[in-house]
Every structure is written in structure tokens, then in C-alpha cells.
Image (cartoon, grey):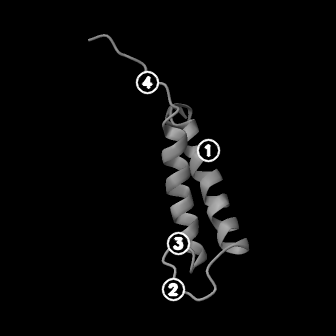
Amino acid sequence: MIFIKKHLLTILGIFIGAAAGFLYWKFVGCNSGSCLITSKPINSTIYGAAMGGLLLSTFKKNKKENA
């Protein structure tokens, strides 16, 4: 439970990015199959999840610990 609270923004970004990647494949996608990311739904979903997680993890506040 502590892990989820600590990384909530990153986890949220992964889910939002995965949904956005899938929707991008569904509505925009590549019909010829030559596009690496958008030719298959799994590729665009994974790419979207990675980008969403990275984007929202940049907004995470770091707490400084006293040594």
C-alpha cells in the first residue's frame, strides 16, 4: 500500500497512457502495417503506457531525507 501511495502519479500515468495509446491505434493507426508503433495495438498500448508513466513521474515531488 505504501508503494502505491508513493508512486500514484506514475501508476496513473501508465494507465492513462495505455488507454491513449490504444485509442490512438484504434482511431489513427497505420493501415499499411509498416509503422513500428502504430501497426499493432499492443505496440501502441505499451508505448503509450511508457510515455504516460514517464510524463507523470516528472511531477512527483522528492522528499529530502536527513542523514
The residue that disc 3 covers is 43
Q: Label 4 vs label 2: CA separation?
A: 41 Å
Q: Are the residues at dot 2 and dot 1 in contact (C-beta closer than 8 Å)?
A: no
Q: Earlier in the sequence, mark 3 or mark 1?
A: 1
Quick one: SS at disc 2? Answer: loop
Q: Residue 17, located in which quarter of the rendered image?
A: bottom right
Q: Residue under label 1, please give it.
A: 12
Above or below, 28 relative to 13: below
Of the two numbered discs 1 and 4 on the same chain, state the one appearing first in sequence.
Answer: 1
Q: Earlier in the sequence, mark 4 or mark 3?
A: 3
Which amino acid is tagged 1? Leu
The percent coordinates of residue 1 (x first, y second) are 55, 35
Check the image and name the residue furthest to the bottom. Answer: 32
User: Where's the C terminus, which quadrant?
Assistant: top left
13 is higher (above) or lower (below) than 25:
above
Q: Which residue is mark 2?
A: 34
